[in-house]
Image (cartoon, rainbow, N blue to C red):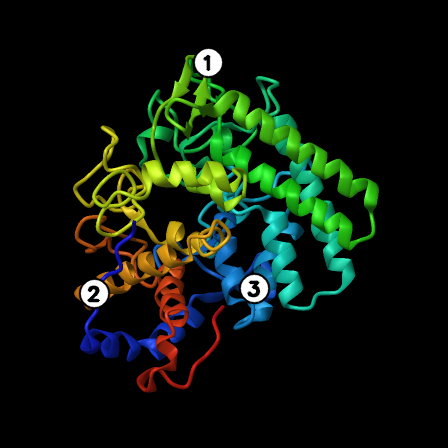
Amino acid sequence: MVVPAKISEAQKSMLCGRKNMLLDALRNNAALFEQYPGVPLLKAGDIYNGIWLEHNQDCYFIARYMPEIAWASQDVFIQHQREDGLLPFAFMLHPQEEHERVCFSHIQSVWPFARSAMEIAKITNRPESDFIRIYRAAEKYDHYLSTSRNRAKTGLVEMYCEWDTGHDNDPRVMDGGIPHTCPGFDAGNMPDLPVMPILSVDLSAMLYGNRIAMAELADMLGMSAEKKKWEDAAQQLKELIYQYLYDPEDEFFYDRSPQGFRKYRTEHITRLFLNKVVDQEQFDRIWKRYFSTPGKEFLPNFPFPSVSVNDERFVGGMLKNSWGGNTQAPTTLRAFLWMDHYNRSAELDAVLSCWLKAFAEYPQSDFPQEIDPFSGAPVGAGKNFTPTLLVHLMAMQRLKWFEKEDCQPAETIL
């Protein structure tokens, strides 16, 4: 089980005293982009001086707090969708080259666009016309992924480059000569490598989640036939994920290349949970085996590491921007979207207490994107990374620290 961290009252008071500073830093991460005049968009942070599709859950969590910014940060992707259906993966605030202005070099999507945009549109009371726009954009995106990322004709989504899944510096998405980004800065171009194409667990899980959201959107819009179509398509994709990517002996899901399973135990397993691909019974088995023994697999002192600490490919040494080992704020932020669903609410509280302990033990931290999974020390030179700020704020809110006198007045983030 996840062991809650012990945090002294003095440490709690110190952390509570940061609340307004954290909120100011979050507000300061919004900026006007020339690609979307009029309304600021939510940046990922100072060293990631742009907006990324993989950060769409950040906007969900600020939607009640900064509604216009949250919606604009979804709408910008619809406005700049390519004709063939590919959504940009990012927009740079100060582009140096044309391909940085609207970026199509890889996929880099985790929580499905249809889900994030739909949920944010609900919270921000968008008109029906915007739900229709979301539906049409997500429909085109599904078509793109099902054609341009389906060279092997399996029906699964293929990975072509390291940054496709956002797992920078992770051996799982580097081994075999895999390049950072797709040739010609175009996500449709597959590198000419023996390991290609790679059937991707997390990209396929994302497409499954996108289809489930599409069915819900169709239902909202009164399109019963379309709802059934997306439900059937999601179920078919789920069966393919199990057929090609599940190893029953390991009770784990792995990417597959033409040479067979790529057996890396990494954070990508949580993206199946995020998209609700596995049922409760199987989740419980995976959880017990990989997430419940302190000091093993995905449960070091400060969970969840980006690679199992027992995987021989785990990368130690506190290297910055390492999804090869470090515990990442985006993983923890996304845990809000699946741990309660799988009846692990107490464990989520415990994980959040570990992060707060890390913030307390290293008060000099400027809130970079990652921490050391063994010590909790901040990693990297980044400052005010949006998911890290949100983890700090939402952990205090969830654990009801905002009810403490020195955390008043309470402001709702969730």
The mark nearer the N terminus, 1 or 2, is 2
Which one is nearer the viewer's eye here, 292 or 111? 292
Hey, what amino acid is under mark 3? Ala
Q: Residues within 10 Å of mark 3 (few under 14, many from 20)?
A: many
Residue 141: x and y, percent?
A: 65, 39
With 304 as the anchor, is 336 left or right in this view? right
Work out how far the residue at label 2 is from the one at label 3, CA to CA, in angstroms: 34 Å
Q: Is residue 108 visible?
A: no
Rendered image quadrant of residue 305: top left
Q: For the point 23% across and 48% down, which residue is it?
A: 373
Question: Label 1 to label 2, Cα distance in Å?
Answer: 48 Å
- The residue tagged with tag 1: helix, strand or loop? loop
Alpha-carbon span between mark 1 and mark 3:
41 Å
* Residue linked to disc 3: 70
Residue wearing tag 1: 258
Instruction: Please state which of the two labelled residues, at mark 2 or mark 3, is closer to the viewer.
Output: 2
The residue singled out by tag 2 in the image is 6
| Label 2 residue SS | loop
Q: Residue at x 47, y 67 (%)?
A: 30
